[in-house]
Amino acid sequence: MSANVLILSGYGLNCEEETLHAFEYAGLKGRIRHINDLIENPKELEEVQILAVPGGFSYGDDTGSGNAFAQKMKLALWEPVRRFVERDTLTIGICNGCQIVANLGLIPGIDKKYGERLVAVTYNMTARYQCRWIDLSVNENSRSPWLSGGRKMHIPVAHGEGRFMMDESTLVALRKCNQVAISYIRPDGSAAGGEFPFNPNGSQADIAGVTDESGRVLALMPHPERGMFTWQRDDYHELKDRAAREGRELPEESDGILVFRNAARYFEG
Amino acid sequence: MAYRIEVLGHEEDGRALRIRNALGGDAGVRVVDVYTSEHKAAAGSTFKSALANPVVQKVDALPQDFDWALEIGFLPGVTDNTGHTAEELLRLSVNDHEGGSTACYSARLYLITGKVTREDIAALAGDLSNRLIQRATIKSRDEFVRDGGMGAVVPKVMLDNKGLVADAVELEINDQELETLGKQGIKNEDGSRRGPLGLSLLYLQAIRDYFRSEGRNPKDIEIETLAQTWSEHCKHTIFASPIDEVKDGLYRHYIKRATMEIREKRGDGDICVSVFSDNAGGIIFDEEYLICDKVETHNSPSALDPFGGAITGIVGVNRDCMGFGLGAKPVINRYGFCFADPRQNPGYFRDPKGTDPMLSPAKIMNGVVAGVESGGNCSGIPTPQGFVYFDDRFAGKPLVFVGTIGLIPRTINGQPSHVKKARPGDKIVMAGGRVGRDGIHGATFSSVALDEGSPATAVQIGDPITQKKMSDALIKEIREKGWYTAITDNGAGGLSSSVGEMAGQSGGFHVELERVPLKYPGMAPWEIWISESQERMTLAVPPEHTEALIAHLARRGVEATVIGTYTDSGRANVSWHGETIMDLSMDFLHDGIPETPLVTTFTRGGTAEAKLADKADYGPDLLAMTARLNICSKEFIATQYDHEVQAGSVLKPLQGPGRVYAETSITKPVLKSPKGVILSQALFPRYSDIDTAAMAAAGLDMAVRNIIAAGGDIKHTALLDNFCWCSSDEPERLGQLKRAVETIYTLAVQYETPFISGKDSMFNDFKGYDSAGKAIKVSAPPTLLISSIGVIDDVKKSVSMAPKAAGDLVYLLGATKDELGGSEYYDHLGHLGSNVPETDGHQNLRLYKLLGRATRDRLIASAYAVGLGGLGVALAKKAIAGRTGLDITLPSSGLSKAAMLFSESTGRVVVTVAPQNRKEFERNFKGYEQCHMIGSVSFSENLLIRDVLSVKTADLEEAYKAPLRGY
């Protein structure tokens, strides 16, 4: 069975089209839904298996990135969303979507208690927007279906507020269940250790992405949909040149595709 | 009563860290987000918890251990986006809207500890705020305790209801009084004036004569409308007027004619679809799509409020794209800034007493950079391409160029998408933001020099999210439904311009002005009509579709209102609560402007060439050149501007492992297509000190050459022109202008690269006072920005600037001449010189065709077009980009070493070629005299130019990156 994806839009979300393209390229069927249309017809969530909250600038980041959109969802759409994540479904929040999902309390969802805000995604240490390509390592013990088989990823970040912050106790709990799913690393594979630009925002423990306990909900600041193809990479011209000299074809696909293909596989069984 | 909610950020808040660094020492800073509202629900816990993230923020729990409190909030009527969002949350958290207005206002409070004085805090307030739009309140800890806090400030607009009718204006006055009317505006009852109309005596006489023939005096709104419609900003009178022997004016005779001639010559190969007639120019992208491009300037507003000016610039040009044809989707933004050195402050004032200071170059730069960041990033449009140029003559007015590329299907519902026409009977619908007093007189103000009388109401702040909601609804959902017949944006002149222009298609209009939704009551009709409040589009909607259109927009959180009807009456008619307050003939409105013949003179500038003895080592010179503001890295901008959103970025603003800031980009606007859009831009203002012809040609050549170097096709390349001139009422300045325009006509026709759109800003002058109270005039050098846009068939054939492998051969293509005049090197030495680079279009075109073929055959490993700083800087940038060494031997030329290194002769490209491609590469260039093998990419860590210099690449990289690193 091929799953259906619902990608949210509206109020300044802006990555819905490329996110749809990524899911479709991975073989899934998708639709973009304005949040107001979904509020009008929340039953639509029962017809889909994957919910994606894409990147963007909902409400211009006013009152804290992702906050206002999350409050709107909480006040107008909470029960249908809670029922959705409690089913055997997949949810992903990318960048602004990550901030929304965190403010909504879909992560970390410790003990399946969705709705509690325990993780903040806040102002970069540089207090500057950062658009740059970074290296990530995927927690090999993560149980997230989104990340099966993932080890390292080279994809971009683009955000002004991407710094994960939480109480030590929350971090301990997250680590216990391998919910810290993705971390910033240096190109050589060692930990970023909080150092800019490898960790582009000063995120606690180099955290780039967090899942709920089940791993079915993934919230990450980097953009896998912008790192699907080799031609999107920052080192594309170097890779292309090397491949030409070595007389081989440069692969079309790059690291970010893993996430979307995993989503497709999850529902293939 | 007013409720105040204080949301305290955590100790390590990134925003606090920056301010701590700015204050220096051991100062501590806490940031508090403040919200005020008069609605009682604002005191409730639902609203408070919606505003604060409990993980990192606390509500109403200010720490007590601070020494100073600094609060910055908006003045009444200034767009407060955060306040608007808070209001939405407030509305969501109350079930019914009892308790009056739900309006919310935002402010930011900084609590500061440490050994800092009130003066330090005042200086910080100056850095963080702009007194034209913001208030700053400073309290010591004692004052804070004594007053019981900062106090709840509700910056509500309170206008009295005076002047809510259209006033008659007496035009039967003498010429002197007419001149005063033009310069200072219509007189109020109390004798004060309403602000500049920018109408000359000649224009006012024509207006007086018109109203004589109508047998009445005009109303204020009619005069204001004519002032907007006839402004230099809207009518481009200088480009339209007869000038010397050129009776049809510079625009028709040169720019438009160049495009017509090229299109004719191309025949079936013509790439143009819609040129000069719409909000942007459109060319073919592929079988399915058109791309359109527009570059605007927002210089005057940015001089007063850099952030507001820049953000309204970028979101404004986005609307030009949304207003192209039936509405194009914005897919790429670009920018170009000209500033004075941000490390200095000339300390100019607007008034002789020195009480009204101009903003410092650093403040202007920071604000402008931040404005485009906010506008572009919030709108989800990638900003991959731009440049920054520095010259101290931009201290009076910076140049702020902003551009947007749009994508639109070639046909919509079976009709060509670029064709639109408002029909008689169609309703006039205004969609988007509401109208306030912002931006009154923007169009007339940008057409005059900046001085003490410059109005603060010309300042506006954009609201990109309101616009994004409107853009998504119109372009992605409504456009294909066929609910509107025409669309245009509200920019300069507001409704008076947008409705007036669209009504040109139908033949007239009737607007019921009281229907226009307002931000606050108390606006006079003329203000509503010409307000430049942002985020608005005007549409022509057949009556049967108005209800559906308005309802659909409402579901997307966008307000839209029917404000009138397009007619074929031949009249521009506006009523106010049933009374006619404007009734002009459309012919007079659009064509009544009197012709003003212009005369010009021209004198070539420049000084004697410098006599330079050859040095033994040019290493220190090259390091100093690499660190010059016009050459060094602007990485801090590139990383702040999201160039990856929409996922189509191929050739990025930072290239190679050494991350060199490049001025050419490639982006795929359609992810499923192999094609890409190549963009570049160039300008050479300093060359104007010698000859504006050289200035103009160099810019056009560089904009085209950058496209060729990156793998573009000259046959699929088009141009945009933005003239930013100064003192355009002086014959000498007009002579410089004419020369520049003649030159680009010739060169564009030679290259067969058509102009598709343009804009001019003719008075980039600042009249004020220095710190001693002496009157000064600072004029920007005559500047032509040429922006290029091309389509590359397959992005796999794109070429970046970074060398790829040691052992590759380095070639210099094109002739180097003794042309240091106006160069960065001469400026570094304090010379101007005379030998400014002359552009040989014929020779250049030969090279571009050959290089294009080599690129398509994939023979080029890297390419970089030689620009400011000449060959020496080009080699330095290539070494830095590739983090590699180069081993170079300069070709024998008869030139001095300095000229060979730093001459800025146009038409040159440095390429690297893999050894296995050498034969084929050289065969490709057989018969072309100016293909010079000058060395190789080396295994060393040095840029070695034999007998000239040897510098470590790492040292060059440090010199290149250090100057603007801290910004």
Image (cartoon, rainbow, N blue to C red):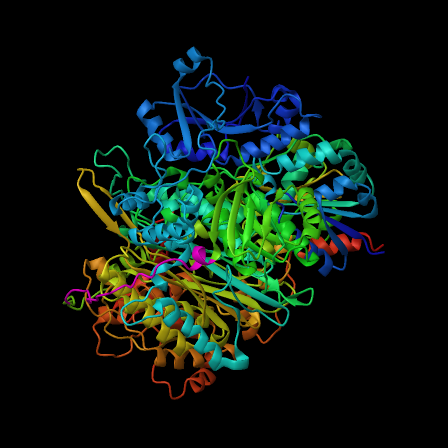
* Residue B729 in view: yes
User: Which part of the image, by quadrant, shows the C terminus of chain B?
Assistant: top left
B433 relative to B602 in the view: left or right: right
| Magenta-drawn stretch, dominant element (helix, strand or loop) | loop
B691 relative to A3 in the view: left or right: left
- Picture quadrant of residue B937: bottom left
Residue A34, horizontal then vertical, whole percent: 70, 46
- Picture quadrant of residue B140: top left
For residue B137: magenta? Answer: no
- Picture quadrant of residue B829: bottom left
Along the line of sight, the residue nearer the viewer: B509 or B41: B509
Q: How many marks?
A: 0
B698 relative to A235 in the view: left or right: left
Position of residue B210 relative to residue B61, above or below, is: below
Position of residue B64 relative to residue A238, above or below, is: above
Residue appearing at x 43%, y 35% in the figure? B18
User: Which part of the image, by quadrant, shows the N terminus of chain B?
Assistant: top right
Residue B802, horizontal then vertical, whole percent: 44, 65
Residue A60, horizontal then vertical, whole percent: 56, 40
Residue B785, horizontal then vertical, whole percent: 37, 61
Along the line of sight, the residue nearer the viewer: B479 or A130: B479
Along the line of sight, the residue nearer the viewer: B687 or B104: B104
Find the magenta span and give its range: B587-608
Residue appearing at x 68%, y 58% in the figure? B482
Position of residue B74 relative to residue B662, above or below, is: above
Along the line of sight, the residue nearer the viewer: B728 or B911: B728
* Residue B372 in view: no
